[in-house]
Image (cartoon, rainbow, N blue to C red):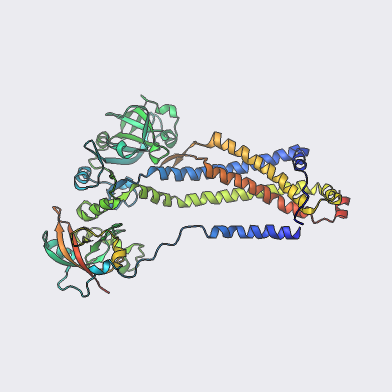
Amino acid sequence: MLRIRLLPWEYGVRNLFRRPARSGLTLLALTTVVLLVLVVVAFIRGLEGSLATSGDPQVVLVYSIGAAADIENSAIPARTAALLSASLDGVEQRYGVSHVAPELYIGTKVQTSEEAPGMFGIVRGVTSATPLLRRQVQMLDGEWPGPGEVLVGKLTAAKLGCDPSLLRIGQSIRFDNRNWKISGHFTAGGAAFESEIWAPLEDLQSALKRQDISLVAVGLSNGASPADVEMFCKERVDLELQAVGEAAYYAALQKHYQPVRMLGWIVVLLVAGAGVFAGLNTMYGAVVGRVRELSTLQAVGFRRRSIVISLIQEATLLSMTASLIAAAIALFLVNGTAVRFTMGAFALRVDSLAILVGCGTGLLLGVLGAIPPAMKAMRYEIVEGLKAI
Amino acid sequence: MNSLCKLLTACLVAAPFVFVGCGTSPAPEAASGPSAEGQAFVLDAEPAAAKGVKDARADAKDGDEVTVVGRIGGDTNPWIEGQAAFLVVDNALKPCNEREDDACESPWDYCCDADALPTHKAMVKIVDSEGKTVATDARKLLGLKELQTVVVHGKAKRDEAGNLTVLADGIYVRK
């Protein structure tokens, strides 16, 4: 009772090649739709990944109480680092070195030459303690910056919107009325630091004529908790400091970008919806021209549901082929492309979730795009269908 | 054919409801009263001769027995996660929600009195018999929430900058 006689698999495949131009154009349209979906999801995943990778759960950021969540607006005394190191019990120490790193974080106009227009870049004043806390950071080439030198992140060229060849070792960039020689490059595993320029803290303070710093990053030993640092900052009302776990800081930034991510998913739905209508349009056209053929199949003995399944098979074959082509293009051409964003840059990530959403969209396009036209074609009586032109 | 149409339509209609169940679980409600552990710190009656935070900062010396009255607040997050410690503010300052036409979302941060706040706030730590801060969030331990007026009794701890911390062994919540 439950067995239904399906049309041969090859029947659906051959039908696709009977009208190669129509099938080719539909394949192109579906590939474009799935590729667009993949690009948008890769954007969302890249943004999420950049913020997620940036936070270390064992690092606490201490900065000015008036700065809210904007570290660029924070200004605290330079002695804060020594004070924290001396006052807190839970600071990680190795070989007599405390994992406490003062940093100066600014956004400023950066020029790749004197004549070039200034582009907005992020500069961080660092000390030799900084890599102890920014464990994701790895030198790619060159050396740690000395006086008058800077270290450039892997995505800095994308952030500045310039050719990467202008940021080679030995080249100079200009900001805050000084020239800085590039001493090396670093990567940070996709973290937000990858789009930054790192300069020696004292040099940067001297260039900016500032004695203060923006924040102190404190590395906690095992067993210590960010609450201990928070307690110190709240007890020392006179210092006007606040402490936030670095992971919590970037999680709050993720929430800040929630509207952008929601918009991204809405775009995915809209693009997929447009793809469904495009598929519907194509399938309606394909089915209308085959009414007589489909009625003949019914006359020969195939049930309507078998014919509907065959039509869905054709559409799904086309849409899944399009998904595979789009996934290959996304993986080889889109994955890893740097995108400039408000306070940094990040790389598009075509990961397993992006592929799942892209291919799932393709599958949906195939199924939903075929059902209505197939059902319309099945409404004809056999005799009427055989007489159709 | 008709039954297939019905089945497919039912699936399409039901699909969105699968995602209705997904999402974050609702935040747990704040405790309405002290926990069994917290009962040991709750005072039955308000201690006499309580001083405001500002006066206590001016008068109390390190190690003195003090009784301080204030409202919970002084920061967007006046609590210390996982510790029975919180900030209190002198009653002389008004929180934002007691000012006209102020729709501040976190009135307990006293952002309207940011200049005066440093001299009008203090830290309160609920300590056990060994002098260690109880390792339970004050909200769970004592059923506290922002802007409640509390009277705390304990020892004053001062630092070289004049900051006051009350190592409290008892707390009374004014209704």
x 26%, y 69%: residue: B39
Q: Which residue occupies the foreground of this view, B94 or B28?
A: B28
Residue A239 position in % (x across, y down): 21, 51
Residue A104 quadrant: top left
Q: Dividing the image into 4 quarters, which one contains the C terminus of chain B?
A: bottom left
In the image, taking residue A313 as reference, residue A187 lies left or right, namely left
Q: Determine if residue A31 is in view.
A: no
User: Does residue A191 appear to the left or right of A371 in the view shown?
Assistant: left
For image coordinates 50% across by 36% down, the residue present is A337
In this view of the protein, which residue sits in the foreground, B175 or A56? A56
Residue drawn at (78%, 38%) of the image: A18
Image height check: is A167 above or below A274?
above
Residue A106 found in image quarter: top left
Q: Quadrant of residue A133?
A: top left
Q: How many marks?
A: 0
From this viewpoint, is residue A272 visible?
A: yes
Taking depth in this image into account, of A144 and A69 the one nearest to the observer is A144
Which quarter of the rendered picture does the N terminus of chain B lie within?
A: bottom right
Q: Position of residue A299 (x, y in %)?
A: 86, 51
The vertical placement of A91 against B125, above or below, is above
User: Would you place residue B76 above or below residue A132 in this image?
Assistant: below
Residue B13: % across, % down: 63, 60
Q: Position of residue A71 (x, y in %)?
A: 32, 46
Asked whether A69 or A320 is in front, the reply is A320
